[in-house]
Amino acid sequence: MKRLAIETAFETCSVALDIDGEVRARSRTEPRAHGRLLLPFVDELLAEAGIVLGELDALVVDRGPGSFTSLRIGLGVAQGLAMAHDLPVHPVSSLAMIAAAGRDPDGPGPVLAAMDARMGEVYAAIYRFDDGRAELQGREVLCAPGDLPDPGGPARGAGSAFEVHGDRLPASIVGELASIRADVRPDAGVLLQLGAHVEPVAAHELVPVYLRDRVTH
């Protein structure tokens, strides 16, 4: 199985190529650089592996929520490649990715993923994991830091909102978390893992999830 994953939801541009379980990756955290970095990363990985796009079996892409411009770049490239080469696309939530990257397989199951959404807001969701499958508890939200969803029991925290918004997050929730990974970065390799458990869609059915009605970044 040959799969390519594209991650552009936040400030990190990350691409990963999985060929029968062997993963190669490129990643750089640089604001507003996705358009410059994404396709060269794809070309480099394919050249290293000695394959061409037409030999891929599927694509995996972050469908959001996240930055409007960054998401549009990643989804646009994924959609174009999928259409050109008749590839299925596995859309993965950015918050599921952050939760998976920040979880402890040996610790409490739920993870509260919370990412800075700018404009004084956060993207947040609670996920549990079952054999690698991310299971959303409730819904993904865009909210004020003080309205962070409550896991309602032992859980871990992951994502940039814990660093950016700090004291504005509810102490009653943050104080009960077993640990917090504010340093978790978006990772296309994690997308590959989660994409294996997400039903694929055709390229024309690929839809971004912004959560915000007014998009300004």
Image (cartoon, helix red, strand yellow):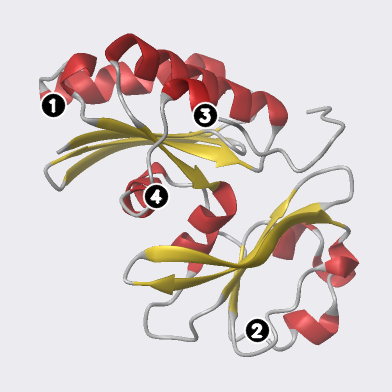
Secondary structure, mark 3, is: loop
Horizontal side of 104 relative to 120 (left or right) equals left
Closer to the camera: disc 4 or disc 1?
4
Q: Which mark is residue 198?
A: 4
Mark closest to the chain's N terminus, 1 or 2: 1
Mark closest to the chain's N terminus, 4 or 3: 4
**Amino acid type shown at disc 1:** Ala
Is mark 4 in CB contact (under 8 Å) with mark 3?
no
Tell me which corner region of the image, top left, top right, bottom left or bottom right, holds residue 14. Answer: top left
Closer to the camera: disc 3 or disc 2?
3
Is mark 4 in CB contact (under 8 Å) with mark 1?
no
Which residue in the structure is indicated by mark 2?
177
Q: Which mark is residue 206?
A: 3
Q: Which mark is residue 49?
A: 1
> Looking at this view, is 186 or 167 the one in front?
186
Q: At 77% from the left edge and 82% from the top edge, which residue is drawn?
A: 173
Q: At 81% from the left edge and 40% from the top edge, which residue is drawn?
A: 212
- Alpha-carbon span between mark 2 and mark 4: 28 Å
Q: How far across and how far down the image is residue 194, in percent?
A: 38, 54
- Alpha-carbon span between mark 4 and mark 3: 13 Å
Horizontal side of 117 relative to 111 (left or right) equals right
**Amino acid type shown at disc 4:** Val
- Alpha-carbon span between mark 4 and mark 1: 25 Å
Q: At 41% from the left edge and 27% from the top edge, which residue is drawn?
A: 202
Q: How far across and how far down the image is residue 184, in percent?
A: 53, 58
Residue 150 seen in the current view: yes
Secondary structure, mark 2, is: loop
Secondary structure, mark 4, is: loop
Q: At 74% from the left edge and 86% from the top edge, which residue is drawn?
A: 175
Q: Judge the density around disc 4: few (<14), some (14-19), many (≥20) Cα neighbours within 10 Å.
A: some
Q: Taking 82 as reference, is 217 above or below it?
A: below
